[in-house]
Amino acid sequence: MSHSGKTRLWTLSAFIMLVCVTGCAEFHQWLHNDFKVGPDYCKPVAPVATDWIDFNDPAVISDGLGIDETAWWRLLGDPMLEELVNRVYQQNLSLRAAGMRVLEARAQRAIAAGNLLPQSQEGFGSYNRTQFSAAGNQFGIGALPIRTLDLWSTGFNVGWELDVWGRFRRNLEAADAGVDASIEDYDDILLSLIAETATAYVELRGFEQRLRYAIANQEIQQGSLRLVSIQA
């Protein structure tokens, strides 16, 4: 039996063994999942409100024309707050680390995708040039002797593990989920940083205004004290 015939016989035997071992139900699921072992991932159900608590408040409703909702802090029109938010983007170490984790997840996803292709490739070649002496050379074409002989040799090997059970495709699905999770973590950290920066800035401005009121009240009280002193 030829090598190709043995390979086909082995493949058929493995397929029959699969059917016998896994049973009809598992075999049907394997076909339904595009020849991938295991159930497909289903996102867990999480209760999420359809609207936020003040969605119908006229004070916060806007037509949305010309407004970038992702840069909501710009609606306050404060250049200092804008500068602080830009510093958060550029200098916060936690945000940078989260960004690096996104790049890491994307690199791992690229590795998982690469496993669908040949896992090993090898190319090789050689060249040999032989120079013959003019004296005693028996090789030639007619009266012209052959002084040189060039020999070329090239080859290419490929090692490829077929994804029969869907292992590489499942790894790719997990890598895609890892990329999405890292991006969501980055967005979560960024949103928290901007919110904390804006909150701290608004509180600072509030304390500054309260301090102005306190100073103004002190001046009023001192004026009243002087009037009382004069009258006395």
Image (spheres, rainbow, N blue to C red):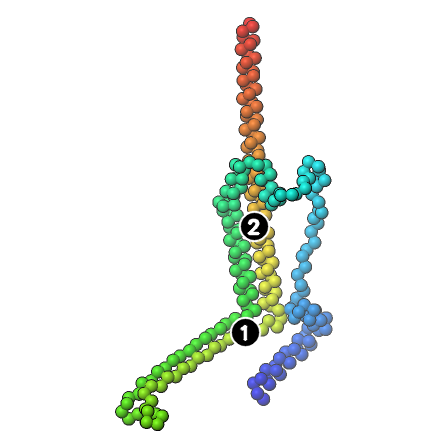
Residue most extreme to the left = 135
Q: Residue 125's spot in the image, x, y percent? A: 42, 78
The answer to whether 113 is drawn above or below residue 191 in the figure is below
Q: Within 10 angstroms of label 2, few (less than 14), some, or many (20 or more) residues?
A: many
Specify the quadrant of the image occupied by residue 231. Answer: top right
Q: As drawn, is 28 to the left or to the right of 186?
A: right
Marks 1 and 2: in contact by CB < 8 Å?
A: no
The residue at the point 61 percent across, 72 percent down is 164
Q: Which residue is mark 2?
A: 186
Assign a secondary structure to mark 2. helix
Assign a secondary structure to mark 1. loop
Image mark for residue 182 = none
Image quadrant containing the C terminus: top right
Front residue of this view, candidates 200 and 13: 200
Q: Residue 15's spot in the image, x, y percent? A: 65, 77
Image quadrant containing the N terminus: bottom right
Q: Residue 177's spot in the image, x, y percent? A: 60, 58
Q: Residue 195's spot in the image, x, y percent? A: 58, 41
- Disc 1 residue type (three-letter): Trp
- Disc 2 residue type (three-letter): Tyr
The answer to whether 1 is drawn above or below residue 158 in the figure is below
The answer to whether 62 is drawn above or below residue 109 in the figure is above
Q: Earlier in the sequence, mark 2 or mark 1?
A: 1
Q: As drawn, is 125 to the left or to the right of 230?
A: left
The answer to whether 181 is drawn above or below residue 72 in the figure is below
Residue 83 seen in this snapshot: yes
Q: Which residue is mark 1?
A: 160
The residue at the point 61 percent across, 65 percent down is 170
